[in-house]
Image (tube, helix red, strand yellow):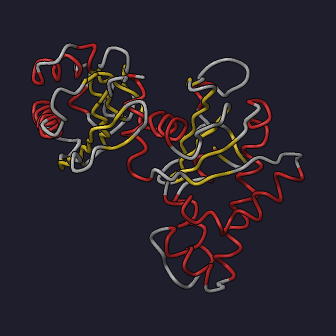
Amino acid sequence: MKESKYSIGCDIGGSHICCTIIEVETGNVLEKSFVSMMVNHAEPKEVLIDTWAKAIIACKKQLPESSSFVGVGIAIPGPFNYEEGIGLFDNSNKKFIHLKDVNVKEALSKTLALSKNKIQFVNDATAFSLGCFWYGSGKGSNQMVAITLGTGFGSSFISKGKVIEEGNTVPENGYLWDKPFKEGIADDYFSTRWFVNSFNGVSDEEVTGVKRIAELAKLGNTDAVSLFNKFGHNLASCLSDYLLNFNADVVVMGGNIAEAFDLFKPSLFSELRMRGIEIPFKVSILKESAAMLGAVTLFK
């Protein structure tokens, strides 16, 4: 019988680290292995690395005895040299500024007493898409496009389990957020701020997030309903050429806006059909664990 391989999947954000033990082949998450620690991105490098190491060590203690441990996969936002594990952040990013030119892989390798090849890094948006492809809503597909609709507009193109970032079938780096769209760039139209600013511009009620606009749309608020219809049309208009070019067979969505999919699905599908496109769109079933799951696929 084949021995189970276990990896620790980590998701590092601006305020925390989450990690859990995952069986690499199946994506099964080991019960009670989840560890989360708060740490602000603005802390000095020593504090960040120490906290991350503590979380990983606490998680590793839950490994089954005599199990095959293959390594730690870490999802972290860019700019970052993922291959070598070096931070490329600077003041313009306003995040992790004390990790500029810091070899995080080396520092964690020493603290965790793990060889460097057992510590692998991946972009957080890429990790989300890999998690969805191997273990989530994209499982069984060949050509998957993943998009995150939340604070910003993330995207990733996966072909047969490999992330495609160059070539004539995908936008450069697989990024859609910076592509020209209408009077600006795509990120201006497919993020929380578009919903909030657009709604507050026409409504008497002031909102701070998409959840409230979705509640109002379900109650029949015409401004809210109209906004979701517009969003669906815009999203189809933005994606259609890329979906055709990549020959996508599924789109998987994450982020808080995706939770309101039912409200923009009719206008999205209507616009796509007009453009000759009929492919399924699915909301990620993995929720917060997607990036941790995606990070362990580095050890497949």
Q: Is residue 293 left or right of residue 49?
A: right
Judge left or right: residue 281 versus residue 129.
right
On the image, the x and y values in percent for residue 89 come to 32, 28
Total marks in image: 0
Q: Quadrant of the C terminus?
A: top left
Left or right, 184 with respect to 96, comes to right
Residue 44 appears anywhere in the view: no
Q: Which residue occupies the foreground of this view, 207 or 221?
A: 221
Q: At 61% across and 86% down in the image, what residue appears?
A: 219
What's the residue at 32%, 14% (across, down)?
A: 84
Quadrant position of residue 101: top left
Q: Is residue 297 visible?
A: yes
| Residue 281 against residue 107 in the figure, above or below | below
Query: Camera-side residue: 105 or 26?
Result: 26
Quadrant in the picture for the N terminus: top left
Q: Position of residue 284 (x, y in %)?
A: 53, 51
For the point 16% across and 40% down, the residue is 62
Depth check: give the residue in front, 295 or 13: 295
Q: From the top left corner, tell me how far across and down residue 133 is, in percent.
A: 55, 37
Q: Position of residue 119 (x, y in %)?
A: 27, 21
